[in-house]
Image: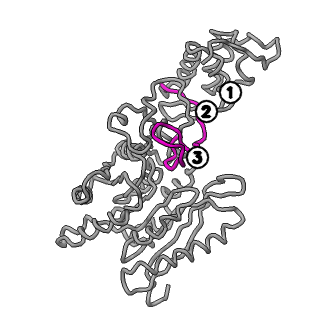
Amino acid sequence: MSQKISPSSTLPFHEKNTITRRHLTSQNPLPTGIERFLLEYPDLRDLFTHPLPKHYTVHPPLLLLPSTPPWPDLLRALPPDLLSSLLSQILSAFTPKRLTHAAINAPIPLHTSSSFSDGSTNHVRTPTGLVPIYGDFGPRDCSPTHPSLPDLARAFWVHGPIPGRLIQVYAPLHTMFSRGNVREKERILRPGGMEGLDGVDGRLGQRHQDIAVVDLYVGVGYFALCYLKRGVGKVWGWDLSGWSIEGARRGANGCGWKAETFEPEVEEGERIERVLTAMDDKATRLLLFHEENERALHMIREVRERCINRKEEDRSSWKAIRHVNLGLLPSSQSMWEAAVHILDAQRGGWVHAHENVGMNVIEQRKREVETLFEGYLVSRGDSGDKWMATCEHVEQVKTYAPGVMHCVFDVHVAPVDPQTGE
């Protein structure tokens, strides 16, 4: 960082060096903190845009600033002591939030570059562009998928905003946080918002506490925590990133729910026994598997078989899987067929398949999705009954890019009623 201050004036001459305490009445804490700093260092006012920047994001105890002017210029222009003083004043202006860290945000890069990677595709969405500028964020050069226990302990963890007064935890140096899925989270949380979350008197036909949900891209629990909030008995989650798994565990614990994590290094028989123990424990609500989601179907089948082969009085620990969430963009299609097999073998359920779709072809894609799911049913082989797949709804979550919509296809998979043919 340069020690030389090179101001570039953006204000008329008569406005320079005229900051007074009357300016400190701003309702926005960011310009308020900057104004306090400029009261001490009025000669540095030329470094700031006019009006003063107002945009920021708070994920307690972290303040995220945008990668737009004046922040990149200030990093180059201010020596470390003055930058630290500026940020200290800004963070103190956010009282009573008690913010302790600051960083400049950046888009998630498509490719990685670190001692742990070779510049390949950034599958786990590591936020390598984030620039810490205040506070200790812990070590950065850690494995993006398999952090050690000391790595997890030394990392800086924050709370991301999520509807329903839920606690979502992530490590900003190592895990992305998606703030654009609020609409889908609210749909899960809202009574009547999503088909098949309507209890014993609705289409679900069961109490929420008697069913399970599988989230094959669980992340830090974006959707898993919402299902738990709705009262779902258990949620199974898979993710490649150990950072995400730890964030989901911490988030569940913060909400008052017990979570168990299962690492791939453990021998399969021992892992299955641990999963069975977690199934028997009513307090354990979230089961987190740190591995490729291609292994999910095998694990679920093994555990289900063990549960249903128990004595009748011990079978209740198995909860029918009635929903499968597939929250990967740009497409989750690689796991659609597995999702069909994961659903309950007697009643079926709903698959929520996320995908980016051109706005002018959403209806066409809906028909294609339904046809694909009908094809997956051929290989179910659970019984001689006829099954059918119906894409009942397409939730348009948000605009992903110009002309592209993030959609969720709600596909109902169930046996055909022999009386009605539906």
| Residue located at (36% from left, 83% from top) | 383
Q: Magenta stretch containing residue 119, yes or no? A: yes
Residue 64 appears left or right of 74: left
Q: Disc 3 marks which residue?
A: 110
Which amino acid lies under the numbered mark 1 shown in the image of this protein? Pro
Residue 356's mark?
A: none
* Structural crowding at the residue carrying mark 1, measured as other residues with C-alpha within 10 Å and reported as few (<14), some (14–19) or many (≥20): some
Q: Disc 2 marks which residue?
A: 56
Discs 1/3, front: 3
**CB under 8 Å between callouts 1 and 3?**
no
* Structural crowding at the residue carrying mark 3, measured as other residues with C-alpha within 10 Å and reported as few (<14), some (14–19) or many (≥20): some
* Structural crowding at the residue carrying mark 2, measured as other residues with C-alpha within 10 Å and reported as few (<14), some (14–19) or many (≥20): some
Quarter-of-image position of residue 10: top right
Which amino acid lies under the numbered mark 3 shown in the image of this protein? Leu
- Report the Cα–Cα distance between label 2 and label 3: 24 Å
Secondary structure under tag 3 reads: loop
Q: Can you see residue 201?
A: no
Q: Disc 1 marks which residue?
A: 53
Q: Can you see residue 326?
A: yes
| Residue located at (53% from left, 37% from top) | 128
- Where residue 38 appears, as percent x and y from the top left, is 65, 13
